[in-house]
Amino acid sequence: MVGVNFPRSRDGEPFAWGLSGPEPVEIWERFSPAYEAQLERLVSTLQELGFAPAVGGAGSEDGEYVRAEYLANSRVVFFYHLEDPADARFIAALNDDDLRRWIIESWGV
């Protein structure tokens, strides 16, 4: 598990759902521009809300995820898969305010 710094370098791990073409382009394909922008937005929002996000799971069957410890009580209260197409589309559909609201309501910040 690693902390998150942008821009990320490719890690050579396989893609959980495979690729739609020769290069990652979809929002659920690690290292595509859309995926990286979404991950950076999610990480930034979590940090603003008092979390310490980290990314793990690259190359695993379920794919990459974000886990985040809430710093006020040292509990991991946020965990979300990024390479699942439905999950990626869900996050993409949220504007910034809705993303914050979803995190707060779902994990009780």
Image (cartoon, rainbow, N blue to C red):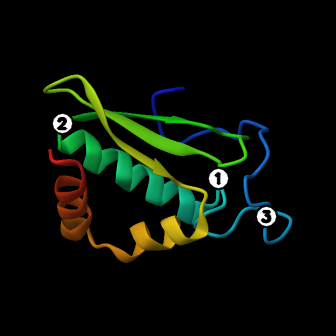
Sequence-first tag of 2 and 1: 1
- Which x, y percent locates residue 45? 27, 50
- Which x, y percent locates residue 57? 62, 37
In the image, 9 versus 92, the foreground residue is: 92
- Label 2 close to label 1 by CB (< 8 Å): no
Q: Residue furthest top?
A: 74
Q: Amino acid at mark 2?
A: Gly
Q: Which mark is residue 19?
A: 3
- Label 3 close to label 1 by CB (< 8 Å): no
Secondary structure of the residue carrying tag 2 is loop
Q: Amino acid at mark 1?
A: Phe
Indicate left or right for 15 with 42 as reference: right
Q: Is residue 20 above or below residue 55?
A: below
Quadrant of the image for the C terminus? top left
Sequence-first tag of 3 and 1: 3
Q: Is residue 102 above or below residue 4?
A: below
User: How dense is the environment of label 3, judged by Cα within 10 Å: few (below 14), some, or many (20 and up)?
Assistant: some
For the point 25% across and 35% down, which residue is it? 51
Sequence-first tag of 2 and 3: 3
User: How dense is the environment of label 2, judged by Cα within 10 Å: few (below 14), some, or many (20 and up)?
Assistant: some
Which of label 3 and label 1 is nearer to you? 3
- Which x, y percent locates residue 55? 50, 36
User: How dense is the environment of label 1, judged by Cα within 10 Å: few (below 14), some, or many (20 and up)?
Assistant: many
Q: Which mark is residue 31?
A: 1
Looking at the rendering, which quadrant does residue 56 occupy? top right
Q: Amino acid at mark 3?
A: Leu
Indicate left or right for 106 with 88 as reference: left
For the point 35% across and 36% down, which residue is it? 68
Secondary structure of the residue carrying tag 3 is loop
